[in-house]
Image (spheres, grey):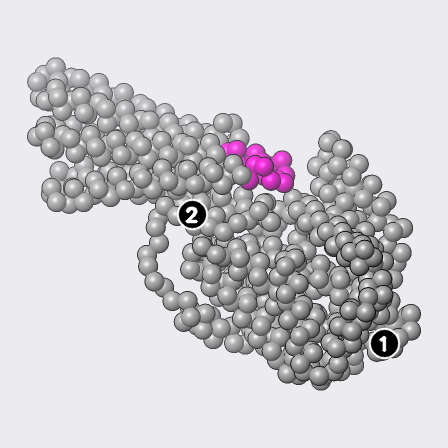
Amino acid sequence: MKALSITLDLLGGLAVFLYGMKVMSEGLQKAAGRRLRQLLNMATKNRMSSTLVGFLVTCAVQSSSATTVMVVSFVSAGLLSLYQSLGIIFGANIGTTTTGWIVSLLGFKVKVTKFALPIIGIGFFSQFIRRWRWPHRIGEVLVGFGLLFLGLSIIKQTIPNLTDSPFVTNLIGTFGSDQLGPRLMLVLLGALFTMIFQSSSAMMAVTLAAAATGLIGYKSAVALVLGENIGTTITANLAAIGAPLNARRAAVGHFFFNILGVIWAVVLFNPFVRLVDFLIPGNPFAQSEQALLLTIPTHIAAFHTIFNIVNTMVALMFIRHLERFIMMILPERKARDESDLLYLSTPLSDTPELAVEAAQKEVERMTDVVIAMLEKVVGILDKEVDRKKLDKTISSILQDEKVTDQLEHKINAYLSKLTHGHLSTASNRKVLSLLSMINDLERMGDHGEKLATLFNRSKEQNLQFSQQGLSDLKTMAVKALETVRPIKEEMAKTEKEILDEAILRENQLNDLRYRLRGEHIDRITKGTCDPYAGIIFSDMLTSFEKIGDHAFNVVEASVGIK
């Protein structure tokens, strides 16, 4: 019973720690969501800037798993190249070591219980201050921070009780040997437990607590840390299951980068441990209380940081070779289905603020499909177009309409789930705006299909438009296209000024429709236009005008009116 009680206490402490990490990470994302997106956009072809971006983003959200899952999704979308993603992943590995420093510098040198509960209390009640946004967001971060250290305190209090178990002491004695076999077993154990809990930060905290209480030695602790670097790659690889090829490549790149680093660190284990000891003051092999509480935790945190810095420096020199190797083992196989989600191809539930950015990109891609449809509609209105080319273009337009339907359904489902997550007020408004946009874009796709079907019917029934009538349809189509094209850039803006431009375009399209409709009635009255063709002409004018209405609705949604 005592063993069960100790195990449950340890799991409870770990659960509180993990939940604190989650709450703190989400709070940090809400507080710095837009800045995180700006940091991502800084990732250029320069490998050093990509690495810096990975480091800064991970420091901001305190979760390398969140960063790598986000990178996997953005790579699959084409927002980041595989080359850029590798640099960001390298930087994320360095950024995640900051958690170890926070825990080692505060968790063992300060009486955690003295400030953990007050911080949780301050953070919790500050979230009820609705007048300003920042106390609410900072309050969430403080609650997570306090829970993190409360969980750490429980872990610290529970771990010494493990020494009462003969099984645990025998196991530690076996793994405590300074031989390659036991060392590899510790690496595997570190990887396994990190895979199970999907948090290298949590396992790092357990490792630090075990070393600080004297349960395991310094060398055993850093061997576990090496394993944790392998285990942390499982999160991105799980996120990449079923995702596009580039997403899987980025996840595999993370795995190979970490495992190659662990291999050289195991081979050079003793020299590398001595190097860290030389750089960091204090003797981590001493068994005094000061060494256990102060020296060993900082040495473990330093080992973790120095290992990842050295590994990154080496990997940056061979980043192109790593990229080619990954592309060789995961080659291109088949063309991508246009209706597949691209930017939202992998789960972003751990980074909801960044998921909104990805959703914005997905809606912009849907806009591209609608614009391409209208360009094809303009093309079929050329009087020189032959029947074979016409059939091919109409078939393509109908396929585009199916793509817009499927994209609307998939994006809608994703955004609906996102509204149930932990979003800031601004991001929640953005999600509602995007939901409105995709509805209007889908309706524009329907009208594009209707235009192609109407024109095809006129050809099948040998209904002839007058030369002026066909020219008027082309004029209306071009004007509708000019109305739609700017919305891709405008949907990412919130300035009220863009609404004035949209109103002007909408009014011009409406005026053109009324003028062309009046001229068309005159032609029918004079007998210069086939009345049956005239019905199709009027229906097509209406569809073009409706497309303009929906384009205006998209701009209204972007500025928060609709």
Visible in this render: residue 503?
Answer: yes
Q: Amino acid at mark 2?
A: Leu
Q: Position of residue 509 (x, y in %)?
A: 32, 27
Quadrant in which residue 534 is drawn = top left
Element type at marker 2?
A: loop
* Mark 2 neighbour class, 10 Å CA radius: few under 14, some 14 to 19, many 20 or more: many
Magenta span dominant secondary structure: helix
In the picture of the structure, the residue carrying the numbered disc 2 is 341
Q: Which residues are magenta?
A: 418-433
Look at 36% across and 37% down and name the residue there: 405
Q: Position of residue 549 (x, y in %)?
A: 37, 27
Q: Residue 282, relative to residue 473: is it above or below?
A: below
Q: Amino acid at mark 1?
A: Gly
Look at 50% across and 63% down and name the residue there: 250
Q: Is residue 131 magenta?
A: no
Whole-Å distance between the Cαs marked 1 and 2? 53 Å
| The label number, if any, that marks residue 26 in the structure image | none
Quadrant of the image containing the N terminus: bottom right
In the picture of the structure, the residue carrying the numbered disc 1 is 282
Closer to us: 276 or 47:
276
Q: Residue 42, relative to residue 351: is it above or below?
A: below
Q: Is residue 256 left or right of residue 131?
A: left
